[in-house]
Image: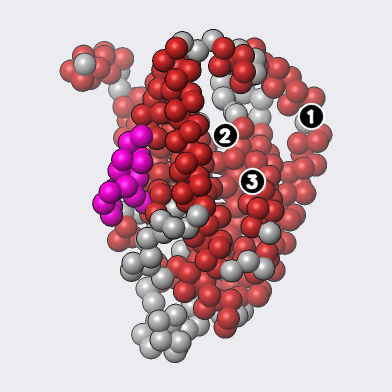
Amino acid sequence: MAFLLGLLMALVSCLLGKCALGVLYGNQPARDKRLRDAFLTGGIVVIGLAEAAYLAAVISGWSFSGCVRLFGALTAALTAGAGVYLFLRRGQKKMGHMQRQNRDGGTLWTGFQRLSGFGKAAFFLFWLLLLLQLVSVASQGRVYRQGDMTVETVNSFLETDTIYGVNPLTGQAYELGIPLRLKILCLPAFYACLCRISGLEAATVVWGIVPLFTLFGAYCAFFGIGERLFPESPSKRWIFLAFTALILWGGDYMYGMDGFGLLYSGFRGNVIRAAVLLPYTFDLCMRKMWKSVILCILAEACMVWTLYGMGACLLAALLLFLIQKLPRGARGLFHREGG
Protein backbone atom coordinates (compact mmCIF):
# COMPACT_ATOMS: atom_id res chain seq x y z
CA MET A 1 0.00 0.00 0.00
CA ALA A 2 2.87 2.35 0.76
CA PHE A 3 4.28 1.78 -2.74
CA LEU A 4 0.87 2.43 -4.32
CA LEU A 5 0.45 5.64 -2.34
CA GLY A 6 3.90 6.84 -3.39
CA LEU A 7 3.22 5.99 -7.03
CA LEU A 8 -0.16 7.72 -6.93
CA MET A 9 1.37 10.82 -5.34
CA ALA A 10 4.05 10.96 -8.04
CA LEU A 11 1.53 10.58 -10.87
CA VAL A 12 -0.82 13.20 -9.43
CA SER A 13 2.07 15.61 -8.88
CA CYS A 14 3.33 15.24 -12.45
CA LEU A 15 -0.16 15.59 -13.90
CA LEU A 16 -1.03 18.67 -11.84
CA GLY A 17 2.41 20.14 -12.48
CA LYS A 18 2.14 19.79 -16.26
CA CYS A 19 -1.26 21.41 -16.21
CA ALA A 20 -0.10 24.25 -13.96
CA LEU A 21 2.92 24.96 -16.18
CA GLY A 22 0.70 24.95 -19.24
CA VAL A 23 -1.71 27.40 -17.65
CA LEU A 24 1.05 29.67 -16.34
CA TYR A 25 3.27 29.77 -19.42
CA GLY A 26 1.32 28.37 -22.35
CA ASN A 27 3.58 27.57 -25.31
CA GLN A 28 6.20 30.23 -24.69
CA PRO A 29 9.43 28.79 -26.15
CA ALA A 30 11.57 30.54 -23.55
CA ARG A 31 10.03 28.47 -20.78
CA ASP A 32 12.04 25.32 -20.31
CA LYS A 33 9.27 23.06 -18.93
CA ARG A 34 10.54 19.57 -18.17
CA LEU A 35 9.26 16.54 -16.31
CA ARG A 36 11.14 17.52 -13.16
CA ASP A 37 9.45 20.93 -13.30
CA ALA A 38 6.09 19.17 -13.52
CA PHE A 39 6.97 16.96 -10.53
CA LEU A 40 8.12 19.88 -8.36
CA THR A 41 5.35 22.23 -9.44
CA GLY A 42 2.72 19.54 -8.91
CA GLY A 43 4.01 18.92 -5.41
CA ILE A 44 3.67 22.62 -4.66
CA VAL A 45 0.11 22.60 -6.04
CA VAL A 46 -0.82 19.65 -3.78
CA ILE A 47 0.60 21.53 -0.78
CA GLY A 48 -1.57 24.48 -1.79
CA LEU A 49 -4.66 22.27 -1.94
CA ALA A 50 -3.86 20.85 1.49
CA GLU A 51 -3.46 24.38 2.87
CA ALA A 52 -6.78 25.47 1.34
CA ALA A 53 -8.66 22.50 2.82
CA TYR A 54 -6.94 22.90 6.18
CA LEU A 55 -7.65 26.62 6.48
CA ALA A 56 -11.27 26.07 5.47
CA ALA A 57 -11.61 23.47 8.23
CA VAL A 58 -9.92 25.67 10.85
CA ILE A 59 -11.95 28.78 10.00
CA SER A 60 -15.24 26.87 9.77
CA GLY A 61 -14.62 24.77 12.87
CA TRP A 62 -15.00 21.47 10.99
CA SER A 63 -13.83 18.14 12.25
CA PHE A 64 -10.71 16.64 10.73
CA SER A 65 -12.91 14.35 8.61
CA GLY A 66 -14.34 17.45 6.92
CA CYS A 67 -10.81 18.58 6.08
CA VAL A 68 -10.04 15.17 4.56
CA ARG A 69 -13.20 15.21 2.45
CA LEU A 70 -12.50 18.70 1.13
CA PHE A 71 -8.86 17.89 0.37
CA GLY A 72 -9.84 14.70 -1.44
CA ALA A 73 -12.55 16.48 -3.43
CA LEU A 74 -10.26 19.35 -4.43
CA THR A 75 -7.45 17.01 -5.44
CA ALA A 76 -9.72 14.68 -7.41
CA ALA A 77 -11.47 17.55 -9.20
CA LEU A 78 -8.26 19.35 -10.09
CA THR A 79 -6.58 16.12 -11.22
CA ALA A 80 -9.53 15.27 -13.46
CA GLY A 81 -9.52 18.80 -14.86
CA ALA A 82 -5.78 18.59 -15.48
CA GLY A 83 -6.24 15.32 -17.34
CA VAL A 84 -8.87 16.84 -19.61
CA TYR A 85 -6.77 19.96 -20.17
CA LEU A 86 -3.68 17.98 -21.14
CA PHE A 87 -5.69 15.63 -23.36
CA LEU A 88 -7.03 18.58 -25.34
CA ARG A 89 -3.50 19.89 -25.77
CA ARG A 90 -1.90 16.55 -26.62
CA GLY A 91 -0.82 17.68 -30.09
CA GLN A 92 1.03 20.67 -28.73
CA LYS A 93 2.64 18.52 -26.06
CA LYS A 94 3.94 16.09 -28.68
CA MET A 95 5.46 18.96 -30.62
CA GLY A 96 7.10 20.32 -27.47
CA HIS A 97 8.40 16.84 -26.66
CA MET A 98 10.01 16.55 -30.10
CA GLN A 99 11.63 19.97 -29.73
CA ARG A 100 12.91 18.99 -26.28
CA GLN A 101 14.42 15.79 -27.65
CA ASN A 102 16.20 17.70 -30.40
CA ARG A 103 17.58 20.20 -27.91
CA ASP A 104 18.69 17.61 -25.35
CA GLY A 105 20.17 15.25 -27.87
CA GLY A 106 17.61 12.44 -27.87
CA THR A 107 17.12 9.80 -25.19
CA LEU A 108 18.93 9.36 -21.88
CA TRP A 109 21.06 6.61 -23.42
CA THR A 110 22.05 8.85 -26.32
CA GLY A 111 23.01 11.57 -23.88
CA PHE A 112 25.04 9.10 -21.80
CA GLN A 113 27.02 7.99 -24.85
CA ARG A 114 28.08 11.58 -25.45
CA LEU A 115 29.49 12.04 -21.96
CA SER A 116 33.22 12.18 -21.37
CA GLY A 117 34.98 9.56 -19.28
CA PHE A 118 34.71 11.65 -16.14
CA GLY A 119 31.10 12.42 -17.01
CA LYS A 120 30.20 8.73 -17.27
CA ALA A 121 31.96 7.98 -13.99
CA ALA A 122 30.06 10.84 -12.32
CA PHE A 123 26.80 9.56 -13.86
CA PHE A 124 27.23 6.12 -12.29
CA LEU A 125 28.48 7.57 -9.00
CA PHE A 126 25.48 9.87 -8.68
CA TRP A 127 22.91 7.15 -9.33
CA LEU A 128 24.71 4.80 -6.93
CA LEU A 129 24.70 7.43 -4.20
CA LEU A 130 21.06 8.28 -4.86
CA LEU A 131 20.07 4.61 -4.69
CA LEU A 132 21.92 4.15 -1.39
CA GLN A 133 20.33 7.30 0.02
CA LEU A 134 16.86 6.19 -1.06
CA VAL A 135 17.36 2.80 0.60
CA SER A 136 18.69 4.47 3.74
CA VAL A 137 15.76 6.89 3.98
CA ALA A 138 13.17 4.21 3.16
CA SER A 139 14.50 1.93 5.91
CA GLN A 140 13.49 4.57 8.52
CA GLY A 141 16.60 3.63 10.47
CA ARG A 142 18.02 7.14 10.25
CA VAL A 143 14.98 9.17 11.30
CA TYR A 144 15.79 11.96 13.77
CA ARG A 145 12.90 12.09 16.23
CA GLN A 146 14.30 14.19 19.09
CA GLY A 147 12.16 17.25 19.77
CA ASP A 148 9.81 16.54 16.86
CA MET A 149 6.10 15.94 17.40
CA THR A 150 4.93 15.50 13.81
CA VAL A 151 3.90 11.84 14.07
CA GLU A 152 2.27 12.41 17.46
CA THR A 153 0.36 15.42 16.09
CA VAL A 154 -0.80 13.45 13.06
CA ASN A 155 -1.99 10.63 15.31
CA SER A 156 -3.90 13.12 17.48
CA PHE A 157 -5.75 14.35 14.38
CA LEU A 158 -6.59 10.80 13.35
CA GLU A 159 -7.63 9.51 16.77
CA THR A 160 -9.69 12.48 17.95
CA ASP A 161 -11.03 13.63 14.55
CA THR A 162 -10.17 17.19 15.57
CA ILE A 163 -7.55 19.69 14.45
CA TYR A 164 -5.26 20.49 17.35
CA GLY A 165 -8.00 19.35 19.70
CA VAL A 166 -5.65 17.73 22.20
CA ASN A 167 -2.02 18.02 23.17
CA PRO A 168 -0.30 14.86 21.84
CA LEU A 169 2.06 14.88 24.82
CA THR A 170 -0.62 14.86 27.50
CA GLY A 171 -3.77 13.71 25.71
CA GLN A 172 -5.58 16.70 27.23
CA ALA A 173 -7.01 19.80 25.59
CA TYR A 174 -4.64 22.72 25.08
CA GLU A 175 -4.99 25.06 28.04
CA LEU A 176 -3.46 28.12 26.42
CA GLY A 177 -3.95 27.16 22.80
CA ILE A 178 -1.15 27.26 20.24
CA PRO A 179 0.29 30.20 18.27
CA LEU A 180 -1.79 31.14 15.23
CA ARG A 181 1.25 31.13 12.95
CA LEU A 182 1.98 27.55 13.98
CA LYS A 183 -1.65 26.50 13.81
CA ILE A 184 -2.12 27.51 10.16
CA LEU A 185 0.82 25.40 8.90
CA CYS A 186 -0.63 22.57 6.86
CA LEU A 187 1.96 19.78 6.87
CA PRO A 188 0.61 17.79 9.88
CA ALA A 189 -2.91 17.96 8.44
CA PHE A 190 -1.62 17.06 4.97
CA TYR A 191 0.18 14.00 6.33
CA ALA A 192 -2.89 13.04 8.34
CA CYS A 193 -5.05 13.31 5.19
CA LEU A 194 -2.69 10.93 3.39
CA CYS A 195 -2.93 8.51 6.31
CA ARG A 196 -6.74 8.66 6.40
CA ILE A 197 -7.08 8.23 2.62
CA SER A 198 -4.55 5.38 2.36
CA GLY A 199 -5.11 3.67 5.70
CA LEU A 200 -1.37 3.71 6.42
CA GLU A 201 0.12 4.46 9.81
CA ALA A 202 1.43 7.94 10.52
CA ALA A 203 5.01 6.69 10.97
CA THR A 204 4.97 5.05 7.55
CA VAL A 205 3.79 8.21 5.79
CA VAL A 206 5.80 10.76 7.77
CA TRP A 207 9.06 8.87 8.24
CA GLY A 208 9.00 6.71 5.12
CA ILE A 209 7.12 8.06 2.10
CA VAL A 210 7.41 11.85 2.47
CA PRO A 211 11.23 11.91 2.98
CA LEU A 212 11.65 9.91 -0.25
CA PHE A 213 9.77 12.60 -2.16
CA THR A 214 11.84 15.28 -0.46
CA LEU A 215 15.09 13.54 -1.41
CA PHE A 216 14.05 13.04 -5.02
CA GLY A 217 12.71 16.60 -5.25
CA ALA A 218 15.98 18.00 -3.93
CA TYR A 219 17.99 16.33 -6.69
CA CYS A 220 15.47 17.48 -9.30
CA ALA A 221 16.09 21.04 -8.12
CA PHE A 222 19.87 20.65 -8.05
CA PHE A 223 19.84 19.12 -11.53
CA GLY A 224 18.17 22.30 -12.76
CA ILE A 225 20.91 24.40 -11.16
CA GLY A 226 23.51 22.19 -12.86
CA GLU A 227 21.90 22.86 -16.22
CA ARG A 228 22.00 26.60 -15.59
CA LEU A 229 25.65 26.53 -14.49
CA PHE A 230 26.84 24.23 -17.30
CA PRO A 231 24.42 24.69 -20.22
CA GLU A 232 26.86 23.33 -22.80
CA SER A 233 28.51 20.54 -20.83
CA PRO A 234 26.39 17.54 -19.77
CA SER A 235 29.48 15.91 -18.27
CA LYS A 236 30.00 18.83 -15.88
CA ARG A 237 26.33 18.63 -14.89
CA TRP A 238 26.72 15.03 -13.74
CA ILE A 239 29.99 15.85 -11.98
CA PHE A 240 28.16 18.69 -10.21
CA LEU A 241 25.35 16.32 -9.18
CA ALA A 242 27.77 13.67 -7.97
CA PHE A 243 29.63 16.22 -5.83
CA THR A 244 26.28 17.50 -4.53
CA ALA A 245 25.29 13.98 -3.48
CA LEU A 246 28.66 13.47 -1.80
CA ILE A 247 28.43 16.79 0.05
CA LEU A 248 24.90 16.10 1.25
CA TRP A 249 25.85 12.64 2.44
CA GLY A 250 29.00 13.97 4.10
CA GLY A 251 26.93 16.68 5.79
CA ASP A 252 24.86 14.25 7.81
CA TYR A 253 27.22 14.21 10.76
CA MET A 254 25.59 16.99 12.78
CA TYR A 255 22.07 18.28 13.40
CA GLY A 256 21.42 21.50 11.50
CA MET A 257 23.40 20.54 8.41
CA ASP A 258 21.46 20.33 5.14
CA GLY A 259 22.58 16.76 4.56
CA PHE A 260 21.46 15.76 8.04
CA GLY A 261 18.02 17.22 7.54
CA LEU A 262 17.59 15.68 4.10
CA LEU A 263 18.64 12.17 5.16
CA TYR A 264 17.22 12.14 8.69
CA SER A 265 14.12 14.36 8.73
CA GLY A 266 12.89 15.06 5.23
CA PHE A 267 9.32 15.43 6.50
CA ARG A 268 9.96 18.75 8.27
CA GLY A 269 8.91 21.98 6.63
CA ASN A 270 12.24 23.74 7.17
CA VAL A 271 14.05 20.80 5.55
CA ILE A 272 11.75 20.80 2.51
CA ARG A 273 12.36 24.55 2.22
CA ALA A 274 16.15 24.25 2.44
CA ALA A 275 16.56 21.14 0.27
CA VAL A 276 13.86 21.65 -2.37
CA LEU A 277 12.24 25.07 -2.44
CA LEU A 278 15.36 27.21 -2.11
CA PRO A 279 17.44 25.50 -4.82
CA TYR A 280 14.39 25.34 -7.05
CA THR A 281 13.84 29.05 -6.48
CA PHE A 282 17.40 29.73 -7.64
CA ASP A 283 16.83 27.60 -10.73
CA LEU A 284 13.56 29.35 -11.56
CA CYS A 285 15.02 32.81 -11.03
CA MET A 286 17.87 32.06 -13.41
CA ARG A 287 15.25 31.02 -15.99
CA LYS A 288 13.10 34.06 -15.15
CA MET A 289 10.07 31.89 -14.41
CA TRP A 290 8.74 34.37 -11.88
CA LYS A 291 5.23 32.92 -11.67
CA SER A 292 6.67 29.64 -10.45
CA VAL A 293 8.90 31.54 -8.02
CA ILE A 294 5.76 32.99 -6.44
CA LEU A 295 4.43 29.45 -5.98
CA CYS A 296 7.63 28.49 -4.13
CA ILE A 297 7.29 31.52 -1.85
CA LEU A 298 3.68 30.65 -1.06
CA ALA A 299 4.54 26.99 -0.46
CA GLU A 300 7.20 27.98 2.05
CA ALA A 301 4.69 30.16 3.89
CA CYS A 302 2.40 27.11 4.20
CA MET A 303 5.09 24.91 5.71
CA VAL A 304 7.66 26.87 7.74
CA TRP A 305 7.10 28.55 11.08
CA THR A 306 8.38 32.10 11.57
CA LEU A 307 11.04 31.03 14.07
CA TYR A 308 12.54 28.70 11.48
CA GLY A 309 13.38 31.53 9.08
CA MET A 310 10.19 31.90 7.09
CA GLY A 311 10.73 34.14 4.07
CA ALA A 312 14.04 32.74 2.85
CA CYS A 313 12.63 31.97 -0.60
CA LEU A 314 11.27 35.50 -0.88
CA LEU A 315 14.61 37.04 0.10
CA ALA A 316 16.51 34.81 -2.32
CA ALA A 317 14.13 35.68 -5.15
CA LEU A 318 14.41 39.41 -4.45
CA LEU A 319 18.20 39.21 -4.38
CA LEU A 320 18.41 37.35 -7.69
CA PHE A 321 15.83 39.66 -9.25
CA LEU A 322 17.84 42.74 -8.24
CA ILE A 323 21.08 41.21 -9.53
CA GLN A 324 19.45 40.52 -12.90
CA LYS A 325 18.23 44.13 -13.03
CA LEU A 326 21.72 45.54 -12.52
CA PRO A 327 23.33 47.17 -15.57
CA ARG A 328 25.41 44.76 -17.59
CA GLY A 329 28.60 46.58 -16.65
CA ALA A 330 27.87 46.24 -12.94
CA ARG A 331 27.16 42.53 -13.34
CA GLY A 332 30.46 42.12 -15.15
CA LEU A 333 32.24 43.91 -12.30
CA PHE A 334 30.76 41.42 -9.83
CA HIS A 335 31.91 38.53 -12.02
CA ARG A 336 35.45 39.93 -12.22
CA GLU A 337 35.64 40.50 -8.48
CA GLY A 338 34.25 37.05 -7.76
CA GLY A 339 36.60 35.42 -10.26
Q: Secondary structure at mark 3?
A: helix
Residue picked out by circle 3: 10
Q: Secondary structure at mark 2?
A: helix
Q: Amino acid at mark 1?
A: Arg
Q: Secondary structure at mark 1?
A: helix
Residue 36: which numbered mark, if any? 2
Give the residue at x 39% y 25%: 240
Q: Earlier in the sequence, mark 3 or mark 2?
A: 3
- Measure how far apart labels 3 and 1 are at the Cα level: 20 Å
Nearest to the observer: residue 239 or residue 171: 239
Q: Nearer the viewer, residue 224 or 297?
A: 224
Indicate which disc residue 99 carries: none
Q: Residue drawn 74% across and 19% down?
A: 95
Which quarter of the rendering shows the N terminus?
bottom right
Residue at the disc numbered 1: 90
User: What's drawn in magenta, residue-wise?
Assistant: 246-261
Marks 3/2: CA–CA distance:
11 Å
- Horizontal and vertical percent position of residue 131: 51, 39
Front-most of residues 326 and 51: 51
Q: Amino acid at mark 2?
A: Arg
Apparent side of residue 230 relative to residue 323 in the rendered image (left or right): right
First-in-chain label (3 vs 1) = 3
Dividing the picture into quadrants, the one containing residue 306 is: bottom left
Q: Residues within 10 Å of mark 2 (few under 14, many from 20)?
A: some
From this viewpoint, is residue 240 visible?
yes
Q: Characterize the local packing of mark 3: few (<14), some (14-19) or many (20 or more) Cα atoms within 10 angstroms.
A: some
Q: Residue at x 40, y 81 (%)?
A: 169
Q: Alpha-carbon distance for marks 2 and 1? A: 19 Å
